[in-house]
């Protein structure tokens, strides 16, 4: 096994060579990947750029002839990602380390995002002090600011690159050392928002008391996408998707959407899941002056100076109910949808700022209308944050997982 060290060796060869030597000095195997296109490599790679572009479905000569830097970077990123996956599947990758500016960061992090959680991933980048969401995505990528541009070795870059090498050495040597008390616990994921915290915290404690480890994801767009990636990676035994608010932001145009594929991974993987309607009474925006003009006259609640919540309407809730019903009905594994008829968030409660029984009724009616008979639709005369509702969610998921385990036995 080796650390994949990815860089554009025509411009960053000296720096990549410095890090390579640091890793090898510590006894770590290194596989240097060249993704450069501007000139000849300054050091010899283990995987030449011709192989990288071949993995992307093109050739180095074709990239040169196109004379399009954007296309070249895109192809290099695609090829690096494919090679990383292939080598990982062969058991040859124990970590990924990248160096670069905008192009190098795009290429190396594409390879990192293609690999599953737990593989050490470190990117030394001139962009690491800015907006890194496009590079990190939902993966466990560590970004280290290069401080100076990666243009030769100097008293600053040597320190940063040495720290990067030492960090990767530490990660690959310690990788996989989980505390024994937790390592064998089946993994459960859950979704939470501030307005569903009492429910999810009670459910988490209930699942932990039953011998499960629970990962709670903040339903802020990135949280939902990250949870879905864990499920797709096959790490998850059961799902308590109690806070599906990201669906409302995707539908209406809020800032916390998790994309169109939200609420699909468990269904596709056949993982037992309990779905509820947490915070579907709201769409999220920033400060009041950032709310689009088209929503003037709607019902709002100022959660804090930086978060403005907008109440979903009966029509929007009708559409959300249909979407949840369709996605739940398509699931390959045991699925239940829990409906808290007394409200879906801390502010959707009788007398609260988002209490709107007609809007909630549109959501509930839509679920009843569109849900397939093979999905359990469980309606209870409780608020989502009532302790009894959390207990029901725990009991339901445990029952669904037991059913799945029984069906899997020969």
Image: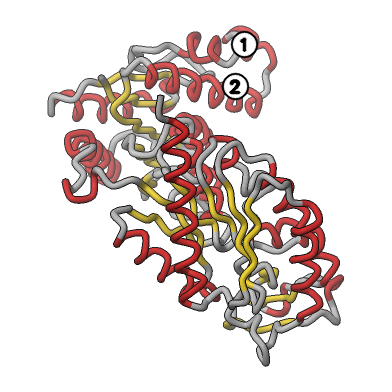
**Element type where label 1 sits in the image:** loop
> Can you tell which quarter of the image residue 124 is in?
top left
Q: CA distance from mark 1 to mark 2?
A: 8 Å
Q: Give the residue at the far bottom of this rendering.
A: 351
**First-in-chain label (1 vs 2):** 1
Find residue 395 and report its horizontal and vertical position in percent. 45, 60
The residue lying at 74 percent from left, 66 percent from top is 364
Say above or below: 189 vs 197: above
Tell me if I can see residue 129 in this picture: yes
Foreground pick, 170 / 221: 221
**Element type where label 2 sits in the image:** helix
The residue lying at 23 percent from left, 37 percent from top is 175
Using the image, tell me which numbered label, if any, was put on residue 252: none
Find residue 381 and report its horizontal and vertical position in percent. 62, 76
Circles 1 and 2: CB atoms closer than 8 Å: yes
Using the image, tell me which numbered label, if any, was put on residue 58: 1
* Quadrant containing the C terminus in the rendered view: top left
Q: Residues within 10 Å of mark 2 (few under 14, many from 20)?
A: many
Say above or below: 92 vs 50: below
Foreground pick, 7 / 199: 199
Find residue 267 and report its horizontal and vertical position in percent. 59, 40
Query: According to the image, label 2 marks what residue?
Result: 75
The residue lying at 60 percent from left, 76 percent from top is 345
């Amino acid at each position: 096994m080796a650390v994949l060290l990815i860089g554009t060796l025509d411009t960053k060869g000296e720096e990549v060579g410095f890090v390579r030597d640091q890793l090898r000095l510590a006894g770590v195997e290194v596989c240097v990947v060249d993704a450069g296109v501007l000139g000849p490599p300054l050091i010899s790679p283990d995987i030449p750029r011709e192989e990288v572009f071949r993995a992307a479905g093109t050739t180095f000569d074709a990239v040169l002839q196109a004379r399009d830097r954007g296309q070249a970077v895109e192809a290099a990123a695609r090829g690096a990602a494919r090679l990383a996956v292939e080598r990982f599947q062969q058991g040859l990758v124990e970590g990924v380390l990248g160096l670069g500016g905008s192009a190098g960061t795009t290429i190396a992090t594409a390879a990192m995002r293609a690999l599953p959680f737990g593989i050490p991933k470190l990117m030394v980048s001139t962009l690491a002090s800015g907006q890194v969401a496009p590079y990190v995505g939902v993966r466990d990528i560590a970004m280290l600011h290069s401080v100076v541009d990666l243009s030769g070795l100097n008293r600053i870059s040597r320190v940063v690159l040495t720290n990067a090498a030492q960090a990767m050495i530490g990660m690959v040597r310690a990788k996989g050392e989980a505390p024994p008390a937790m390592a064998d616990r089946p993994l459960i994921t859950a979704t939470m928002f501030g307005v569903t915290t009492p429910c999810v915290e009670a459910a988490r404690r209930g699942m932990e008391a039953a011998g499960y480890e629970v990962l709670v994801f903040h339903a802020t767009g990135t949280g939902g996408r990250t949870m879905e990636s864990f499920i797709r990676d096959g790490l998850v035994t059961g799902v308590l998707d109690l806070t599906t608010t990201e669906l409302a932001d995707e539908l209406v145009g809020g800032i916390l959407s998790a994309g169109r594929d939200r609420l699909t991974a468990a269904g596709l993987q056949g993982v037992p899941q309990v779905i509820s309607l947490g915070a579907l009474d709201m769409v999220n925006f920033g400060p009041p002056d950032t709310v689009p003009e088209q929503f003037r006259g709607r019902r709002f609640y100022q959660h804090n100076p930086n978060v403005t919540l907008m109440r979903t309407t009966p029509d929007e809730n009708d559409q959300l109910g249909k979407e949840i019903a369709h996605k739940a009905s398509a699931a390959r594994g045991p699925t239940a949808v829990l409906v808290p008829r007394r409200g879906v968030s801390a502010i959707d409660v009788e007398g609260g700022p988002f209490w709107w029984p007609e809007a909630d009724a549109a959501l509930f009616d839509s679920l009843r209308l569109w849900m397939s008979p093979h999905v359990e639709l469980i309606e209870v005369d409780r608020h989502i944050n009532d302790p009894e509702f959390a207990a029901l969610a725990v009991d339901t998921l445990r029952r669904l997982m037991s059913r799945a385990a029984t069906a899997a036995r020969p």
